[in-house]
Image (cartoon, coloured by chain):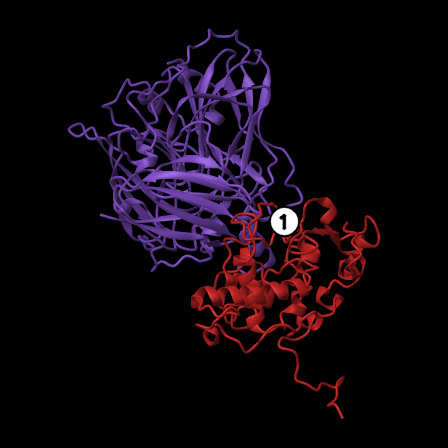
Amino acid sequence: MASHRWLFRFPPFALACALLPLGAAAAQGHDHDEPRAASASGRRSTSTPPRRGPSSVGATRAADDPRTVELTLTAAPARLALRPGGPPTEVYAYNGRVPGPTLELREGDRVVVHFRNALPRPTTVHWHGLHIPSDADGSPFHPVAPGASHDYVFTIRRGTAGTYWYHPHPHHDTGAQVARGLYGAIVVRAADDPLPASLAERVLVLSDNRFDADGAVDLPEAGSPRARMDAENGREGDVLFVNGEVMPTLTIRSGEVQRWRVINASAARVYRLALAGHTLLQVGSDGGLFERPVKVEEIMLGVGERAELLVRGTGAPGSRSELRALPYDRYIPQTRPADWDVTRPLLALRYSSKPPVAAVALPERLRPVPPLDTTRVTATRVMTLTQHLINGRSMDMARVDVSASLGATEIWEVENLVGMDHPFHLHGFQFQLLDRNGVPEPYRSWKDVVNVPKHETARFIVRYDDYPGKWMFHCHILDHEDHGMMGVLEVRP
Amino acid sequence: MRTSSASYRNVGRLAAVLAVGACMSSAATTGGSNRSETPAAMAGRTDAAGQQRAPVASDRRAQVLRGRALTIEHACNGCHGGADPAAAGYLAGARGPQDDFLIGPCATTPGATPCFKTRPRNLTPDNITGLGRFSERQIFNALRFGLRPGETPDVEITSTVPGQGNFPAHPKYLAPPMPWPSWRHMPDQQLWDIAAYLKYGVKPVRNKVADSEGPPDFWASAYTPDKIGAYPAPPFPTANEKEPE
């Protein structure tokens, strides 16, 4: 397969890139019944040679039960060379990698994750964006003790194909654990994906970090001025990673179209993405594909958000381009970093010298995104966001902030009352944005995070389908979440 | 920079003394309000026309009118907008750069640093751009303790010591020249009255005011007791005072 061959031609990035041969084969629908489920990506432990494929996470798909995917995931301390040329860093890693292995799943899969916590502290694995039972959600209600194991069991529902991610979600400790390296991508594929299977695919996990001189992850002492600054702004780092690599090079051929799945796994950084010299086609967001592609010059990717993009190789053979994070002022003036207005390069896109390939026909319609019925709305929930607080209150595990019935349709009106952006995330249920600051959303999509800019309001509609239980909603700036900017939605059966 | 003739808008003077509370004589007063009158005491009274009014509405209206008088006499509108309650933009906050305050040496020496632009907020009860979504208690906490309502939980605060009695461990204060260090000495009921007036006696105006600039400590180092004095004030008479003869 052509898309594999050129991947191998550039091994440094191919190893870090989340698309690996088995996953790509699955995407093309050639081996739906073969063992597959998780491919590997990310920076590996310096002591472990790179491996790829299902064995890297111990995933199996039994011949007599091809819809069940079993895999082993271990969170453990590791020592990795995160920065090129820098000293090794003590990290926390899923299966020895930062980011963790990319989980490749299909609609209809029953997933069994044998998780082991080899960290010296409690953790959870939250499957960000997946519509799964609340006891499998990895919320702070279900911590896994140090040394303990837990099986996460859930089924991937039809219609939920998209790009998701996983990360820890223990109460008060999410930011520190993610900063140490615990995050990874999830790709859910549909059998009836409307985009051509021939498109080469990239999963791009965006993250940032900062380090001490000795290479350690820089986590300031609690209560120190720098810790307070992190608590205020959310922790940002000066080193920007794509799949654990600094400024990696991707290759493309003139005329080629690639499908990029971009995940903002940063604790606080907002990415205003632009690919120099290219107009992008956005085909999806958090919960999968749009109804039709949308042409964009740049994409705002708030914390926790995802975007599916089609990158059209309009450059000349041998030319180069760059994916950049443009400046975006999400800060209050008191703590705005001095270098907030710097444009930061993320990755290089190199055109091969080969002559252009013929254009690929792209569909004008992707899939229906049926609107949730506004006439069935039974309640409007007003959520006011201020620094570290929702509705003036701090997170209380013993309190239920919103109580609703299974199957109910409701509107959430999320009002940001302060001068800093807050990305608002609801667990368990994908929602549809109705409007931002009164301006109707131009197209429908499934979302699980919405960035609410300073002094603005976002309204979304959501239906609590399938899964009763307690669900978190919170600011996805991890430092804000850890400081109590979170609440509990209880969906009653 | 704001160039009004009102004396407390003399920002150069403010800048010279970053301990802002000291810049302005306290306008706290008990005139015109009845400090002992509690809502319970007023319940079920009759108005001037002899009509029995619904107790709750009556209490609320009386409280709002007391708050209105206090708001006018403390010249809240002097910074926050409108020459009087009938004026356009009354209490609706800064309308543009002409309403910015310059805090710091730059107020007297152009280009000097530090230099912070601060802006009078929209005090009308608009839900997003004003005080609409903040509770009366959060407004009370702003006037009594100088705590920014957007950073302070909606809780009763029983201490002025950071970290104690719900007082934030790392308090974030309203930007200068808001004279809360003086006005915090007003009686509780007067502050509640002002909060009630702003919440229930003023029509909401949508006017988004850009956030004030300030140091990363949100003025905590400018609002220490040695700069703004003790709360409550030390007992009378201090060494500077004497019993009347």
Residue furthest to the front in view is B49
Residue pictured at 51% horizontal, 62% vertical = B136
Residue B159 position (above or below residue B120): below
Shade representing chain B:
red
**Percent from the top left, x then y, of residue B110?**
83, 49
The purple-coloured chain is labelled A
**Percent from the top left, x then y, of residue A194?**
34, 18
Residue pictured at 42% horizontal, 52% vertical = A486
Pick the residue in front: B164 or A18: B164
Mark 1 — on which chain does it sit? B
Pick the residue in front: A459 or A464: A459
Q: Name the residue under label 1.
A: B211
| Left or right: A395 as drawn, with respect to B169 | left
Q: How crowded is mark 1: few (under 14 residues within 10 Å), some or many (20 or more)?
A: many
Residue furthest to the left in view is A64
Q: Can residue A45 be seen in this view?
A: no
Where, quadrant-wise, is the N terminus of chain A in this rendering? Answer: top left
| Left or right: A243 as drawn, with respect to B206 | left
Residue A429 position (above or below residue B181): above
Residue A53: which quarter of the image?
top left
**Percent from the top left, x then y, of residue B94?**
67, 49
| Left or right: B48 as drawn, with respect to B216 | left
Residue A223: which quarter of the image?
bottom right
Element under disc 1: loop
